[in-house]
């Protein structure tokens, strides 16, 4: 009587053993956590600043629904890719936009302002992958829809280099050694991400014709593309690495308004570089985010 092993043959036995080993390793893996930071300007069909208002406008009501559906597409893909936990940080305006009744009920929602890590609040070092939804190009980008950096009217430099919200936030993730795997937004937001974050998965939600105009892709198509892109990004997360920023980290804000720079220069440890620019040095991106929130608030007190 031949044993089961001899009937199976060496190759099959090897396959069986490697399958068992794979299953064991798989069952020992820590639960997969995915973090989604969702902004609004880069969501499909969002074209103007009316979306920024909570005044109950027709545009805002639809915008928050479109934003929530794009987040759901990303979250659904994350769960399909094996995520045990998905945390979503509502990261537009006052950080209260996503419709909690429409949002995928399996998600944890980070909502409200202020919060220490801003658009990245809820991210922890045991997160496996970061996803950016509805992102936009930085302040000063030509022909980019709703391009700005944080509260706008300013250019932000990180270690001397101008950054978008996407590349700033990716440095926060890099400091925790978590890869950013996906970004969606208009064509200029995507170009910025590929140039400054790395070869991540991206989806172009619309092609900019100007600050308030663009050629739209239908929301249903964009949501399908986001689903597929997030899935690919999470599967390939092991290939994506970003170096944390070199410390100490310098932050330099260039405002379009002298009074804003004046006010911000009153904060401790600042250096007034010129009439419009103020520089700070911090030891971590997390410290820098707290500073950013205060600078945003102080500078917006004198916005014209
Ligand atoms: Zn933004």
Image: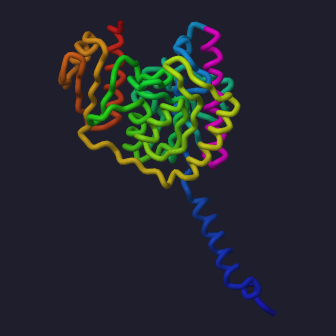
Task: Examine the rendered structure and indicate whether residue 299 appears above or below residue 147.
Answer: above
Residue 77 drawn in magenta:
yes
| Tag count | 0
Residue shown at 42% from the left, 22% from the top: 148
Q: Position of residue 246 (x, y in %)?
A: 27, 43
- The segment highlighted magenta reads 57-84
Residue 141 in sight here: yes
Main SS, magenta region, reads helix
Residue 71 drawn in magenta:
yes
Q: Position of residue 102 (x, y in %)?
A: 68, 25
> Dividing the picture into quarters, in which one does residue 61 lie?
top right
Residue farthest bottom in this picture = 1
144 or 60, nearer to the observer: 144
Residue farthest right in this picture = 1
Q: Is residue 241 left or right of residue 131?
A: left
Q: Is residue 63 left or right of residue 297?
A: right
22 or 278, nearer to the observer: 278
> Dividing the picture into quarters, in which one does residue 73 lie?
top right
Residue 266 in sight here: no
Residue farthest front in this picture = 209
Q: Position of residue 225 (x, y in %)?
A: 65, 39
47 or 151, nearer to the observer: 47
Q: Considering the image in quadrants, where does the C terminus appear? A: top left
Q: Considering the image in quadrants, where does the N terminus appear? A: bottom right
Q: Position of residue 194 (x, y in %)?
A: 46, 41
Q: Is residue 17 left or right of residue 6?
A: left
Residue shown at 74% from the left, 83% from the top: 8
Rendered image coloring scheme: rainbow
Residue shown at 77% from the left, 86% from the top: 7
Residue shown at 61% from the left, 26% from the top: 44
């Amino acid at each position: 009587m031949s044993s089961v092993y001899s009937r199976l043959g060496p190759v099959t036995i090897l396959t069986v053993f490697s399958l068992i080993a794979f299953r064991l390793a798989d069952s020992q893996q820590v639960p997969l956590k995915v973090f989604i930071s969702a902004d609004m300007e880069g969501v499909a069909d969002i074209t103007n600043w009316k979306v920024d208002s909570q005044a109950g406008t027709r545009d805002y009501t639809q915008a928050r629904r479109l934003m929530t559906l794009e987040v759901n597409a990303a979250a659904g893909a994350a769960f399909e890719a094996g995520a045990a936990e998905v945390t979503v940080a509502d990261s537009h305006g006052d950080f209260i936009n996503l419709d909690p009744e429409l949002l995928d009920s399996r998600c944890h929602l980070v909502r409200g302002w202020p919060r220490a890590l801003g658009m990245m609040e809820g991210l922890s070092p045991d997160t496996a992958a970061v996803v950016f939804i509805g992102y936009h190009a930085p302040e000063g980008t030509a022909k980019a829809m709703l391009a700005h950096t944080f509260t706008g009217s300013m250019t932000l430099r990180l270690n001397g280099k101008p950054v978008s919200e996407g590349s700033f936030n990716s440095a926060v993730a890099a400091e925790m050694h978590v890869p950013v795997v996906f970004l969606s937004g208009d064509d200029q937001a995507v170009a910025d991400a590929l140039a400054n974050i790395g070869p991540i998965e991206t989806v172009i939600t619309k092609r900019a014709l100007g600050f308030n105009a663009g050629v739209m892709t239908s929301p249903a198509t964009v949501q399908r593309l986001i689903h597929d892109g997030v899935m690919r990004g999470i599967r390939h997360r092991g290939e994506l690495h970003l170096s944390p920023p070199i410390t100490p980290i310098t932050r330099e804000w260039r405002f379009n308004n002298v009074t804003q720079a004046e006010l911000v220069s009153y904060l401790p440890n600042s250096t007034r570089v010129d009439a419009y620019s103020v520089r700070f040095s911090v030891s971590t991106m997390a410290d820098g985010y707290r500073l950013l929130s205060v600078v945003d608030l102080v500078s917006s007190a004198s916005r014209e």
